[in-house]
Image (tube, rainbow, N blue to C red):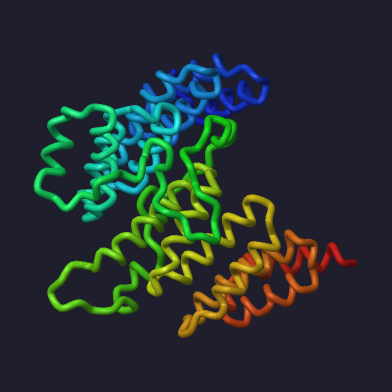
Amino acid sequence: MAFDKEKTLDLAQKLIMKGQPKKAIVEYIKLIEADPKDTRLYLKLGDLYYRNGENEKAIAEYLTLAELYEEEDLNSRAISIYKKVLAINPKHIDALHKIAGLYLKEGLSGDAKNYYLSVLELKPDDPEAKKALRGSDAPPQSRDILRNISKDIPKTMPAVEVPSPAAFPSPEEIKPFDDKSDLFPSSVLESQNLPLYSGAEVPPSDKDSEMHYHLGIAYKEMELFDYAISEFELAASNPAIKFDCYLMLGSCFLEKGDSAQAIQCFKEASQIQGLTREKLARLHFNLGLAYEASGMFSQAIETFNQALKLDQSFSEAQERIRRLQQLQK
């Protein structure tokens, strides 16, 4: 009899809803054995182990997941998973090494140094960390990654520390996602929108901001919205992806139930000069969603109509208008 993946997923979800995580774990192990390349399954199984108090098993699943992301060259996702490991065990040497190595691979040597320095705080004779730092202009002190794995947050934001166990969401329905297509903001993919540099690499500041954007996407996928928001705030300093960052910030606040802050982010995005009709249509649609979530139905209908004027093929906007008009009757 052929293995029915959808049926097994449905059973596992029902077991979770019934408060039977151990039985759900058995089903997820079956799913992984049947499809060992499905990254979503490792994240779900890791979360189940974690919620069940089996931290070492959770870490093992997260490490496997991070390695799969590395194989696909999805470095920002891998980094976010290794940071999840550090949230459980801040002294996990392998995770610190992995993050440092991935930052080096992305050309972010300053971030890599901080993680290698944290390795040396735990293991002063570590040969790999010493070799990486030898001859460099590393700062005399690390930023203590063990207590604060994020880069410095702007003063308008509270300091972001390593997530506590309670910060991670309870296991719930897995939302499918495309591992590649959603990692890059449209303005990064549209190379004609980027400034040209004569035969040179992208300046470090741009690399930093794009990496923050990618990390924000990864955190958003894990529904760690506060950490995603911090990353998008940092990435927004790059004018080339500022619009995409504000769109993602609004989306995060909307997911958190803070529609007022979402509206503010979308309005900030509207102030950016030179937006295409396609981007303006997306912006108005998202602003309409925020108005709808706030119960401001008239404003939502008006904004969805503006999205339609900009893009008449925006069928979802039409559906929203129709539904809201029925609610107002």
Q: Nearer the viewer, residue 140 or 217?
A: 140
Q: Nearer the viewer, residue 129 or 8?
A: 129
Task: Residue 220: tell me if it is visible.
Answer: no
265 horizontally vs 208: left or right? right
8, above or below 143, in the image: above
Q: Nearer the viewer, residue 181 or 2?
A: 181
Residue visible at 52% across and 55% down in the picture: 229
The C terminus appears in which quarter of the rendering? bottom right
Residue visible at 54% across and 35% down in the picture: 168
**Residue 48 at what x, y percent from top left?**
52, 24
Residue 264, quarter of the rendered image: bottom right
**Residue 219 at what x, y percent from top left?**
47, 46
Residue visible at 27% across and 44% down in the picture: 72
Task: Residue 302: tell me if it is visible.
Answer: yes
Residue 316, quarter of the rendered image: bottom right
214, above or below 45, in the image: below
**Residue 1 at what x, y percent from top left?**
44, 18
**Residue 298 at what x, y percent from top left?**
80, 73
Residue visible at 74% across and 63% down in the picture: 292
